[in-house]
Image (cartoon, grey):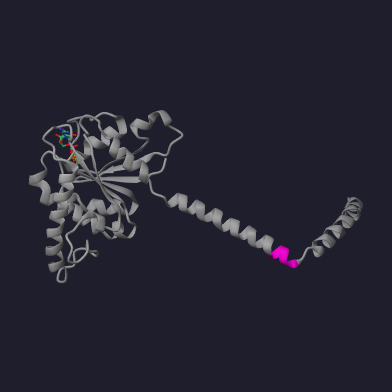
Amino acid sequence: MEEMLEQLKKRVNPWMDVAEQKFRAIPIIQIYVAVGVLVLTLIIFLSIRLFKRTKSNTIILAGLSGSGKTILFYQLRDGSSHQGTVTSMEPNEGTFVLHSESDKKGKIKPVRIVDVPGHARLRPKLDDYLPQAAGVVFVVDALDFLPNCRAAAEYLYDILTNAKVVKKKIPVVILCNKTDKVTAHTKEFIRKQLEKEIDKLRASRTAISSADISSEFTLGVNGEAFTFIQCHNKVSVAESSGLTGDVVQVEQFIRENVRP
Ligand SMILES: Nc1nc2c(ncn2[C@@H]2O[C@H](COP(=O)(O)OP(=O)(O)O)[C@@H](O)[C@H]2O)c(=O)[nH]1
Ligand SMILES: [Mg+2]
């Protein structure tokens, strides 16, 4: 046994010597460069992995009760509205490949959709989900819009001044739903009305905020009428009909923010 080891040593030694000589012949700077490149590659590789893992796939459906969130949720998941089967008091959520993409199942990243009930007393739930959101779909009833305009603007204001939304620049789409009805208001009309209403809110809320600090962030530019362009995050408008399954624009928004 020992003899074998001796023999092995004798055979390996000349090679070790050669290796050592070769190593010494390499200029020290080259070794530094090699190690540097290795470390850098490792850092890049690790940070890419970390970045990928923290990238969220959560999309939040928010908006007043009756705007059509739950029907949209089922349209996105199953391609059907399941009408009249659900009343939502608890957040409805699921992780799935969008119905329209079901032929690409397995090759495509699933989306997590959370349907947050619009009842004012359940809204704190929204704060639990916002930190994880890749995007917010703010659903508006385009049919019964005017009587609800003020309430919708208040809810939207709370979202747009939410610390997480501002800091992480979470994109928001104002989705004008129920466009299957001819009497539905256009998205341009709804955008303008919401801007006007938020402009009023902005004046009243900044006036009281010194005493009763409600939101950490303020909206818009002082002395200018409010428009959504002034927001740091991207705010867009789109249309849909959850009832007839016209959900192309909301699917587009989802895929812009949750990469397949
Ligand atoms: N015409 C029409 N009605 C809709 C549409 N989406 C929802 N609704 C109706 O609006 C009501 C509220 O829908 P729901 O999804 O429960 O709203 P949620 O409270 O926001 O979850 C229901 O009576 C739906 O039938 C739509 O695209 N067009
Ligand atoms: Mg609902």
- The image quadrant that residue 204 belongs to is bottom left
Residue at image position (20%, 45%) is 117
What percent of the width, then of the height, locates residue 151? 12, 51
Residue at image position (26%, 57%) is 231
* 244 vs 117, nearest the viewer: 244
In the picture, measured across the screen, residue 44 lies left or right of residue 155, that is: right
Residue at image position (34%, 46%) is 58
In the picture, measured across the screen, residue 258 lies left or right of residue 155, that is: right
What percent of the width, then of the height, locates residue 50? 48, 53
What percent of the width, then of the height, locates residue 178? 17, 36
Q: Quadrant of ligand 1?
A: top left
One can see residue 130 in this view: yes
What percent of the width, then of the height, locates residue 225? 16, 60
- The image quadrant that residue 83 belongs to is top left
Does residue 166 sit above or below 57 in this rendering? below
- The residues colored magenta run 28-32
